[in-house]
């Protein structure tokens, strides 16, 4: 069993000149190739397989993982500087980078040497697509999961349903949480690496979403689907620890930074539009109401960025800490994103309601209030820690 701390990469000193070059490269990529992919995804309503290939070949799917398993080993806070940039073009592009750079955190601490070679390394390199598979139609995303397994010899037989599984339809494997039949609560849960297709598995593509167009979501039905016991990560009873321990906190912080990145795109569009759009012969940027709104948007955005970086540093210093700070960052940043995108659309006026970059950003922004836990879940987490 690996001894890597849950969710933590091995510390790697950062060569500042090298990182500056990488950051400039990513910025150029999102402003050019990223915008081209944005237009194509919006037109085709799908993520072309070539985008996955391009991101993998550029090394963008393995930025945060430790070098020992094939990653670049970027410290978490420095990786966040890049995910902010990746969040500016299409949300599906950002989703690929975010998911690919985070799933190893759930897998690695519980994988044995053989599983590291079979699952973790291929996931980090981008050769294997893995979908995080927790949410169910008739349960929450925690100890009330209903999907169950029965063990017969060296095989688990999996039954139940999962839905809204991001990239679940195009994945190779599912990192899936279930429970031993007859158990309750967190006890008896297991984490399994399940093939996305095969005997006893129905893999159904769900309908298009309002935003984040192109990212596929799967509704999965399992009817005694056989899964080798050798595909279990950790021990019986460790399922929820694999699913959320060491993974959820940094993932929420990453999502908070994606809100910052998308808000920065909305702010830039609003500033540009305010200088171009005229009323009564003057650019609306000269109108105090508009100028003040843009100033408020910029201050709101920077506050979210700094709170997110504070949460990242807290978690980096102590992997057992940061739950409250991560939920604060996710809560504030996701709400900030709604305010900034709404303000940006108002600057555009009626024309912003037509298909356009700001209209796409506005649609994509709404999804961030659900990703990695709703606003209500974040408030519950914060209150629980404060009132304990």
Image (cartoon, rainbow, N blue to C red):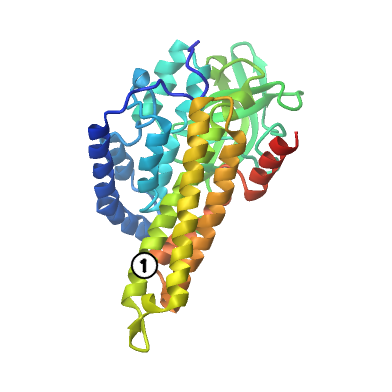
Q: Position of residue 159 (x, y in %)?
A: 65, 30
Residue at the spot of label 1: 271
With respect to residue 335, does 342 lie above or below?
below
Q: Residue furthest bottom?
A: 280
Q: Position of residue 335 (x, y in %)?
A: 56, 55
With respect to residue 178, does 369 lie above or below?
below
* Horizontal relation, residue 262 to residue 148: left or right: left
Q: Residue at x 37, y 20 (%)?
A: 69
Residue 52 occupies quadrant: top left
Q: Position of residue 77 (x, y in %)?
A: 42, 35
* Horizontal relation, residue 248 to residue 122: left or right: right
Q: Residue at x 28, y 47 (%)?
A: 27
* Horizontal relation, residue 34 to residue 215: left or right: left
Packing grade of label 1 (10 A; few <14, some 14-19, many >=20) is some
Query: Would you say residue 197 is visible in this rendering?
Result: no
- Count of number-bearing discs: 1
Q: Residue at x 40, y 41 (%)?
A: 96
Q: Residue at x 45, y 37 (%)?
A: 99
Q: Position of residue 177 (x, y in %)?
A: 61, 29
The quadrant of the image that shows the C terminus is top right
Q: In the image shown, does 360 or 180 lie closer to the viewer?
A: 360
Q: In the image shown, does 170 or 356 lie closer to the viewer?
A: 356
Give the SS element for disc 1.
Answer: helix
Q: In the image shown, does 12 or 187 lie closer to the viewer?
A: 12
Query: Would you say residue 308 is visible in this rendering?
Result: yes
């Amino acid at each position: 069993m690996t001894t890597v701390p849950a969710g933590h990469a091995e510390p790697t000193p950062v060569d500042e000149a090298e990182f500056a070059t990488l950051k400039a490269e990513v910025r150029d990529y999102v402003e050019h190739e990223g915008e081209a992919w944005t237009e194509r995804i919006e037109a085709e309503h799908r993520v072309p397989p070539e985008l996955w290939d391009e991101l993998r070949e550029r090394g963008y799917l393995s930025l945060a993982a430790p070098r020992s398993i094939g990653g670049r080993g970027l410290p978490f806070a420095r990786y966040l500087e890049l995910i902010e940039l990746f969040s500016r073009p299409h949300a599906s592009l950002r989703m690929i980078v975010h998911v690919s750079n985070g799933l190893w955190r759930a897998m690695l601490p519980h994988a044995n040497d053989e599983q590291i070679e079979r699952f973790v390394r291929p996931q980090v390199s981008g050769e294997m697509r893995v979908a995080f598979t927790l949410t169910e139609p008739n349960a929450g995303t925690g100890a009330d999961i209903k999907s169950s397994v029965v063990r017969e010899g060296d095989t688990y037989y999996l039954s139940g349903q999962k839905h809204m599984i991001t990239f679940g339809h195009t994945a190779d494997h599912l990192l899936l949480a279930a429970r031993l039949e007859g158990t309750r609560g967190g006890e008896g849960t297991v984490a399994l690496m399940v093939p996305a297709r095969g005997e006893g598995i129905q893999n159904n593509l769900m309908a298009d979403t309002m935003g984040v167009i192109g990212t596929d979501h799967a509704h999965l039905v399992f009817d005694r689907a056989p899964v080798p016991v050798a595909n279990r990560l950790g021990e019986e009873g460790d399922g929820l620890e694999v699913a959320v321990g060491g993974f959820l906190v940094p993932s929420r912080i990453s999502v908070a930074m994606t809100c910052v990145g998308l808000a920065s795109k909305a702010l830039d569009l609003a500033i540009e539009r305010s200088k171009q759009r005229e009323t009564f012969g003057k650019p609306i940027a000269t109108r105090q109401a508009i100028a003040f709104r843009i100033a408020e948007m910029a201050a709101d955005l920077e506050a979210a960025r700094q709170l997110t970086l504070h949460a990242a540093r807290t978690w980096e210093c102590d992997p057992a800490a940061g739950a409250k700070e991560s939920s604060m960052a996710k809560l504030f940043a996701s709400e900030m994103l709604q305010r900034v995108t709404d303000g940006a659309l108002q600057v555009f006026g009626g024309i912003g309601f037509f298909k356009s970059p700001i209209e796409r950003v506005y649609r994509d922004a709404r999804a961030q209030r659900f990703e990695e836990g709703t606003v209500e879940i974040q408030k519950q987490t914060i209150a629980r820690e404060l009132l304990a």
